[in-house]
Image (cartoon, rainbow, N blue to C red):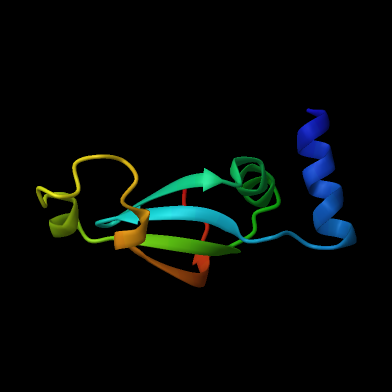
Amino acid sequence: RDRWVNVYLTLENSGWAPILVHKVGDQYYVEDGHHRVSVARSLEMTFIQAKIWEYPVQMLKAKDCQSAPCAERGSAKAYVVECQD
């Protein structure tokens, strides 16, 4: 609860850094920013800033990308994304 309150106060005082999200196909996975997403949902915010690493599904099926650290094969882009339930 204390962490959640601190995240809310940070939004009120100075704003948030973008969350870090991985997009695989049509699915989004939050790596960093779970508390910010939780606070945003409770405040019924529609959008939140995010840095998104995109991984095309066909890239993940490639033989040379069998281990988790394939970030260098993706592309980082800054976005404002819609908060989804």
Residue in the picture at 19% in, 51% down: 60
Residue 81, position as x, y percentages in the image: 50, 65
Residue in the picture at 50% in, 44% down: 31
- Residue 13's image quarter? bottom right
- Farthest residue toward the top? 1
Residue 76, position as x, y percentages in the image: 43, 67
- Left or right: 6 with respect to 36? right
Residue in the picture at 73% in, 59% down: 16
- Farthest residue toward the right? 13
Residue 3, position as x, y percentages in the image: 78, 34
- Residue 72's image quarter? bottom left
- Left or right: 3 with respect to 33? right
Residue 24, position as x, y percentages in the image: 29, 53
Q: Is residue 69 above or below residue 19?
A: above
Q: Is residue 36 above or below residue 16?
A: above
- Left or right: 22 with respect to 41? left
- Residue 59's image quarter? bottom left
Front-most of residues 72 and 74: 72
- Screen quadrant of the N terminus: top right
Front-most of residues 57 and 85: 57
Residue in the picture at 62% in, 61% down: 18
> How many circles with numbers are drawn on the protein?
0
